[in-house]
Image (cartoon, rainbow, N blue to C red):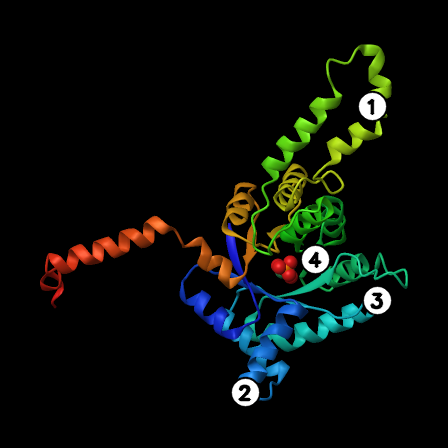
Amino acid sequence: MKIFVDTAKLGEIKEAFSWGIVDGVTTNPSLIRKAVEEERKVKGKVDLEVYVGEICKAAGKGRPVSLEVLSQKASKMVEEAQTLYRRFNPIVGNVLIKIPINTYTGQEATDYEGLKAINELSRKRIPTNTTLVMTPEQALLAAKAGAAYVSPFAGRVDDYIRKNLGIDFKKNDYFDFELMREISKARLGDYLKNPTAKEIPSLYLDEKIKKAISIGKDKGITSGVDLVRKIVNIFRKYNIKTKVIAASMRNPQQVREVAETGCDIATIPFEVIREMLKHTKTEEGVKKFYADAVQAKYEELLKS
Ligand code: E4P
């Protein structure tokens, strides 16, 4: 699995690349806003074009850098994509244009505009990364339209499920969907005590049972990881070449679980990559080895 760093902060991008484990960068307007606000505090003024150019330089030739469009209509999105591509692709050679799968915001009917833009850009050979993917159906349609990449937002799906359940959580908390499944099964147990064949039709239509089964699910999806797994499975079954980027990663355990799905890439925030390195026993071991090395006068061994 490749790792992209999910940030627009130049310092984080440079640092993460220096670790030798990062294969690309993803940005979005919110990440750019955060980075630029921070940069403005230090430098006073930021030229956004120069700044994004610096991100591309930091990624280095050939590494994918995702940049997102702004508009909701296909024609405008295509124009913006072409501008971004013309400006930044010469620097990095692998700009991916992020297009939302559906740009409907509750006003104009723009549901299909994302697909149209993806399709047109793919015909113009501008690679796209479909963003804000929350269901396998959306991912499938994006792939059919010609998306080079799809980004299922695992963390936001977990947020949505937990919020609907009224569960209290912090942004980076792991969502234990196995526990959710056990709770759901236990709830079901109350209703399904050895039903007779005659009872089955009415049980099938029983609202309480439906509710117990759908507990902790969003349109049949049990978690963000489940969303990624289902997309990977569908794409593998039909030999679909569109790459899957597990996005909206919140914690190391979630990264491990998306890695187990066989997805192509996980785009991970800088802090989460750091968290992936941590373990109390590693820390404890380093301290102990150091103390023992000092006692053993180890530095004599290391003199050049
Ligand atoms: C990356 O492509 C996404 O824009 C990003 O992972 C979203 O993460 P968030 O849900 O934590 O904002």
Residue type, label 2: Lys
Mark sitting earlier along the chain (1/4):
4
Across and down, in percent, residue 98 comes to 69, 63
**Residue 175, above or below 26:** above
Work out whether residue 242 can be spotted. Answer: no
Q: How far apart are labels 2 and 3 at the CA level?
A: 35 Å
| Residue carrying label 3 | 73
Across and down, in percent, residue 81 comes to 72, 70
| Other-residue count near label 1 (Cα within 10 Å), few / some / many at <14 / 14–19 / ≥20 | few
For the residues labelled 1 and 4, say whether their Cβ atoms are less than 8 Å apart: no
Residue with the most extreme bottom position:
44
| Residue carrying label 4 | 130
| Residue carrying label 2 | 43
| Other-residue count near label 4 (Cα within 10 Å), few / some / many at <14 / 14–19 / ≥20 | many
Residue type, label 4: Thr
Mark 4 or 2, which is nearer the eye?
2
Q: How far apart are labels 1 and 4 at the CA level?
A: 37 Å
Mark sitting earlier along the chain (1/2):
2
Which residue is located at x 51 percent, y 53 percent? 2
| Other-residue count near label 2 (Cα within 10 Å), few / some / many at <14 / 14–19 / ≥20 | few
**Residue 87, above or below 118:** below
**What secondary structure is marked by label 1?**
helix
Residue type, label 1: Tyr
Question: Of 249 and 89, which appears nearest the observer?
Answer: 249
For the residues labelled 2 and 3, say whether their Cβ atoms are less than 8 Å apart: no
| Residue carrying label 1 | 204
Mark sitting earlier along the chain (2/3):
2
Mark sitting earlier along the chain (3/4):
3
Residue type, label 3: Lys
Across and down, in percent, residue 277 comes to 41, 55
**Residue 223, above or below 32:** above
Q: How far apart are labels 4 and 2 at the CA level?
A: 33 Å
